[in-house]
Image: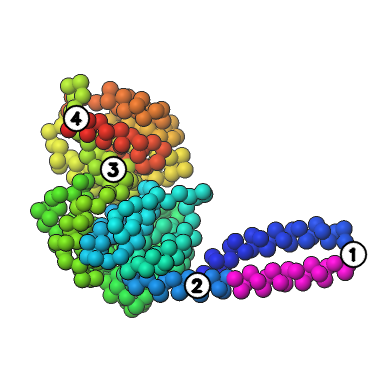
Amino acid sequence: MILFLFSISFFSVYTTSIKVLRLYSENCQKSFYMLSLQIIVVITITGVAFAVWEYFRHQNFIKKIPVRIHINGTRGKSSVTRLIGAGLRAGGYRTVTKVTGTFPRLIMSDGTESAIFRKEKANILEQLNVIKFAARQNTDVLILECMALRPNYQRICEHQMVKATHGVITNIRLDHLDVMGPTLDEVAYALCGTIPKNTMLFTSEDRCFNFMKKIAKKRKTNVFQSLGDEVSDEEMQGFRYIEHKANVDLALEICASLGVNRDVALAEMKTTIPDEGVLTKSIIHEKGKVIYFYNGFAANDPESTLMIWNTIQSAHQDVKEKIILLNTRKDRQDRARQLVETIASEMDFDKIALIGESCELVEEMALKNKIAYNKIIMIGWPSTQVQYQKLFEATVENSVVLGVGNMGVGGSDLAKFFEKKHQQKQ
């Protein structure tokens, strides 16, 4: 399969060559057909030889990186990737950390970050270039967030591209069901495609843990579970954003497996730049109102959304109004439907505000799920300033707002707008 990946560029050239030769042959004598066939044979042999050379060159790059940590899972991949990178940097390792996340980043051993610019859509072949770069940097540890969704691509990423020394699956939840679903078992099977062979797997997953152990056993890999209960409330103090104990526990366990002192690793984790998709809180004091805004746009599966909502409700039992701000994309209607169903059936709220794309369709979903029309605030996708103003006008003097659904189509911009407002009042 890896030969297929390396040969994609070759076969595009090869196909074009055949088309040109066919057009040329129509106007040539029969003798030229033999010449054409000879050219095709030469191109084919050269292409196959190049693919084989690329394959073995990549294997050599892998061998040059002693420790390769491959992070997969439904939620928290980017956060855990960053936490591990920070902890290992503090332990003296030369690291390259690659975050797929909301906005892809490459993080160097000194903590500096570079944005990864893509000319086209995300492609798993991007990982090959990162591995090559890390090998040429004489990296001790490569921390790599899995960017594949399709089950077969997830397996290819691990067993052909990365060949991790430390596998990580943060958790398993119902998301990307159009690719991995529709059931939790199928999602689990897909994500477990990245369980490495003959090494170690670290996870915070609970429900599917036994299933993971069975697959890991077949691959002769030991499994270590971290559920967050080893991290105290005191140790969670000092993070600049709302982090989950399970993520910190998982990252600390991996750092410990590589000999990094717990306190040293944890201290550096608290100073690391968070991913733009992490849960953050902004407090707005404006025109006699107090609004507590939580950026949960990246937690876009129903289970994670519900967990965050319940936590927020516990912290804000005295607010007068609770608003869910749902941001949707036109190409993620299944996700919108799942979230609307969860909001309608399991979440206690006063209003639901709709922003992003296809808001009319989402409004229909809400009405079908028996959300009262007078509870729906239609905002759409105007400028960020207008979105903020319409949402502000819909709030009372003491409100909590949770943004969910998507970071894209303006979600990230609106979250930054709230954060800027929050900082201006500090």
Is residue 150 one of those drawn in magenta? Answer: no
- Which one is closest to the eye, mark 1 or mark 2? 2
User: From the viewer's perspective, is the residue at label 1 or at label 3 nearer?
Assistant: 1
Image height of 88 relative to 336, above or below: below
| Residue 184 at least partly seen | no
Measure the C-alpha gap from mark 1 to mark 2: 43 Å
For residue 29, which numbered disc appears in the image?
A: 1
Q: Which of the 4 image quarters holds residue 356?
A: top left
Is 147 situated above or below 165?
above
Q: Is residue 49 magenta?
A: yes
The stretch of residues the image draws in magenta is: 29-50
Q: Residues within 10 Å of mark 4 (few under 14, many from 20)?
A: few
Q: Which residue is mark 3?
A: 296
Which residue carries the number 4 mark?
A: 425
User: What's the distance in space between the residues labelled 2 and 4, CA to CA?
Assistant: 55 Å
Mark 1 / mark 3, whichever is N-terminal: 1
Residue bearing the label numbered 2: 57
Task: Give whichever of discs 1 and 2 has the lower sequence position.
Answer: 1
Mark-to-mark CA distance, 4 and 3: 22 Å
The residues tagged by marks 3 and 2 sit, at their Cα atoms, a distance apart of 42 Å
* Left or right of residue 213: residue 312: left
